[in-house]
Every structure is written in structure tokens, then in C-alpha cells.
Amino acid sequence: MHRRATAAAVSGALALTALAIPVAQADAGRTGDAAAAARTAQESSVQQAATAKQKAAPFGLRAAADDGYGDTTISNVVVNGGKDVVLGTTNTKTVTVSFTATDDSGIDWATAILWHGGATFDEMDHGVTGNEENAGCTATSATTAKCTQTFTIDPQVDLTNAAAGTWKVWALAQGTDADWVEQDNVKSFAMKRYSKLTANASPEPVLKGRTITITGTLTRANWDTSKYAGYTQQSVKLQSRPASGGTYTTLKTYTSGSGSTAGQVKTTRTASTDTCWRYSFAGTSTTPAVTSTGDCVDVR
């Protein structure tokens, strides 16, 4: 049984050869050091997977999705403390995955992989392996262990725009009696492109009765180019509150521009009293919500 569980782990490594596709595509929009780093990571991943395949060949084993033997289970999976994973264009992010593994004999070892793609693990198009070879598992009873594993995600190496959205956790755990379980999707979570939103109300100060123009720009990380770009055709709310304090109130919803005005919003209001203005974006499945800093106008 130990041999079969090991083969299941190897199958996970083999699936990571699919990462060569998104990394190669990403290189088309990158230059210099970023492209070199992406190619190096790709070559290393493919080489390691090829080595694993060669070692596993004599066994002739491949575990099916959600396969297992015996009474081993995986539960209570938490990714990034239950929060969405959000990345910009350059900074890496280390994400912790925790889960409970149970077997009537106790847990020997466990591991996980983060992945994006189709319905099954074999349809992966992006993936990230753990910083540790196996998860760190601490027994909480004779049958149960709390396991944790960390994953460092580099948007310039691991991600392309196509990877934004729902990701999944593949996991494998084995008991000390060689019972084991492998699951393609023990938990799903959101991987999102970092967003920014600005607001500028002018002129400042302004005479009462004159026109105030409130402009803003909604942008988000472009993982293909490692730059920020306007997020087009999105609903953005104009909000205001008295400059003396209080709660912001939504006045109207606008649509961010496209083409030469990509991500831009613009409107006018008549100056009456000292007021703070801001824009707010509710977010989408690929991009987190964001609200601009308020810009207060002195009306004289």
C-alpha cells in the first residue's frame, strides 16, 4: 500500500508538466530577468517530473481521482486563513494550507498541491507545489493529525491572466498502517488579480455653485505583462459624505471606460457644502473589491 500511495504522489508531480504551457505563454509578454526566471522554473519543474516518471515506470501505477484504500480521510481544509489569495505584478505571496488527516492507526504523512484547470487534476493548466516536500503533521490524538504546508506563489512565474478565478487543493494522506486517500479537490479558493482605484475631485477649493469634476481610474494586475492595466466595463459607484464626518452614501453607478480611457470614470457635481468624494468597486470572481481614498473638497 505504501508503494501505491507513493505512485499517487508521483502522479501529482507528473501533472505539473502542464505548467510548461502557461509559463511559455507568459514569456511572450515578458522580457529580461522575468522571462529568464520563468523559463528556469519551467525547465526545473519538467525535469523533476520527468525523473519522477522514470522512477515510477516499473510500478505501472496511476491512482484514479479521489482514490484511496482503507479509512484515511482529509477534512477541515483551510487556505490562506479562509481569505482570497490576491497577488499584484511582482511581489510573491506565501500561502498556508492547513487540514485534518485521520486514520484509525494515526497519520504517517501527507502532502498537497494548489492547482487550476478543468474538472480533474489531470486537466491542470497552472499549479504550485509546496515549499516543503510533505506537510508538517502534528498528532492531536491517536487517530488524528493537524497538517500544514506553505506555498510561495510568484505572479511572474506561476500565474497568467487565465489563472485568475477558482483554484483547488489536491491532497494525499497516508496512515501508519498504509491506508491512504487521494483527492483532486478537497477545497476550492479564489486566486485574484490585485486591484487599485483612485479618485480626484477638483478644483480644490471651489466656490459654492461651481462645478466639481470627480475622476478616477480602476486598474488591476496583468499577470501576462507584469504591469497594471485599466479594468474596463466595470460598475463603479460614486460615493460622498460630509467633510465633517459620517458614512459614505452611494449617489450613482458608472461604467469604467475602455479603449483609450480604459478603466477611467468621470462625472461632475455642483459644489454646495464641504464634501468628501470617492469611488467604490464591488469586485468580481477574478478581481477583489477596492475603494479609493476619499478626496475632500473645501467649498467657499
Image: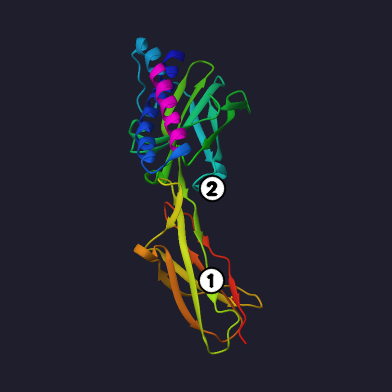
What residue did someone put label 1 on?
A: 200
Q: Is residue 53 above or below residue 21?
A: above
Looking at the rendered structure, the kind of residue marked 2 is: Lys
Q: Quadrant of the C terminus?
A: bottom right
Query: On screen, 233 above or below 161?
Result: below
| SS for dot 2 | loop
Q: Nearer the viewer, mark 1 or mark 2?
A: 1
Residue 232 x, y percent position in the rendering:
38, 61
So how many labels did they put on this image?
2
Whichever of labels 1 and 2 marks the residue nearer the N terminus, that label is 2
- Structural distance between the alpha carbons of marks 1 and 2: 30 Å
Find residue 144 and report its image quarter. top right
**Residue type indicated by callout 1:** Asn
* Horizontal side, residue 63 vs residue 294: left or right: left
Q: Nearer the viewer, residue 27 or 295?
A: 27
Nearer to us in this view, 14 or 175: 14
Please, which residue is most extreme toward the top here?
58
Mark 1 element type: strand
Residue at 41% x, 26% y: name it. 43
| Residue at 50% over, 68% down | 279
- Whether the magenta-drawn stretch holds residue 40 is answered as yes
Residue nearest the observer in this picture, 151 or 184: 151
The residue drawn where x is 39% and y is 23% is 11
Query: How crowded is the residue under tag 2: few (<14 C-alpha within 10 Å), some, or many (20+)?
Result: few
Q: Which residue is mark 2?
A: 83
The reply to whether residue 69 is in sight is no
Q: Using the image, tell me which numbered label, if any, was put on residue 174.
A: none
Residue 24 counted in the magenta span: no
The part of the chain drawn in magenta is 35-51
**In the displayed structure, would residue 143 be above or below residue 250?**
above
Q: Residue furthest front?
A: 32
Q: Position of residue 48 (x, y in %)?
A: 43, 21
